[in-house]
Each structure stands twice: as C-alpha cells, then as structure tokens.
Image: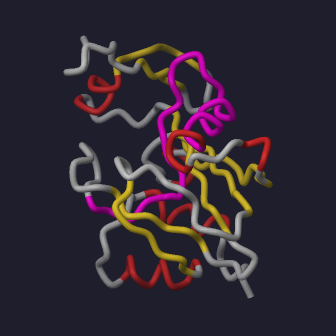
Amino acid sequence: MTHLNNEPEEILDLVNENDQIIGHLERSQVYAAGLHNFRVVNALLINKQGQLWIPRRTAHKKSCPLHLDFSVSGHVSSGETYDQAFIRELEEELNLTSTHISWKKLGLITPHTHGAFAFNYCYQISYNQTPTYNRNDFSEYSWLYPEELLEKIAQGEKAKSDLPIVLSQFYSNKHR
C-alpha cells in the first residue's frame, strides 16, 4: 500500500508483552485492527521552572486532531530503535538535534502494565525556550506545569490518551 504522495506506507514492528518483535504490519492495518502491541516514542520538553511545552495537534491530523500532545511524538518504524525514532522525531517536529540539547530517558509504559495506547518509550528534553516547531504537526502551544495540564484534561480538554498516564508515572508532584 502507498500513501497519496506515492511513498510506501510506514511498516511498524509488532511486539509481545516483553517488547520483543513478533511481526510487522503496515501502520494503517495496525490501526484498522485496533492493535496496541506496536512501539511509539514520546518526549516532553521541560524548562528550568518545571513547565512542560505542550503543543496542540493540527486539525488535519488523522488521529487525535486538535488534541493536546507530547512535545515530540511518533511511531517507531520497523527496524528502528526507540532512541533512533526519538532523534528522528525530535528533528522533524521541533527542529532540534539530540547532540545540541540535554535529554534523558524516563522509561517505558505499556498497554499491559499501565493501560497505555502502545509500547511507549518516554523521554525528557531540558530546554528553556520555545522550539521552532513544525507547523504541519502543531497549531499552538502552552507552557504548563504537570498539575495544570492534568487539571485541563480532567476538565474535558482533549488530549492524547497516554499524556495523563505519562504525567502520572513520571511527573507526579515533581516540579516544586
């Protein structure tokens, strides 16, 4: 299958409960089948005040249009490591290179253990300014403390489903 722009469709690795590769499938087939055993990366950009840079997805996104999102988010393509996907998405979405910023791994959340949408490896980027983000991915942004973001979501603000899980797992009462 190919996209409308004649590029081949992204192939994703399917994994078992231990995050070991058990197969491969086109992205559209993964979503059509409602599968959750594939890999994604997400990162949150945090400033020295402990605020997170939270963008809003553009209206034309296939999944979660106009939802609040991670600072960086993307699928891990077949044959790619979590770190490779993070570095690629960081450049595509925020125009930042991993060698010129401070970042760290936070950890993995999974559908089986945390109720996550997919096998989601999370990263944190220390950065004190608004990045030059990709306008095709994001329409606007806010700098929010984790608790403020959780409150917005609790009040009905649409957000990617793993965002509150990651905040609760890695940012509970940590900014003060």
Q: Quadrant of the N terminus?
A: top left
Residue at position x 31%, y 75% in the image: 157
In this picture, is 115 found above or below 19? below
Residue at position x 34%, y 25% in the image: 27
**Quarter of the view holding residue 47:** bottom right
Query: How far across and how far down the image is residue 6, in percent?
Result: 25, 13
Query: How far across and how far down the image is residue 119, in percent?
Result: 54, 40
Query: How far across and how far down the image is residue 21, in percent?
Result: 57, 19
Total numbered circles: 0
Q: Quadrant of the C terminus?
A: bottom right
Query: How far across and how far down the image is residue 146, in percent?
Result: 58, 77
In this picture, is 91 found above or below 176? above
Residue at position x 29%, y 33% in the image: 31
Q: Say which of 132 and 146 sits in front.
A: 132
Residue at position x 58%, y 67% in the image: 130
Q: Check residue 83 for magenta coloring.
A: yes
In this picture, is 37 found above or below 141? above
Q: Residue furthest bottom?
A: 176
Magenta highlight range: 66-90
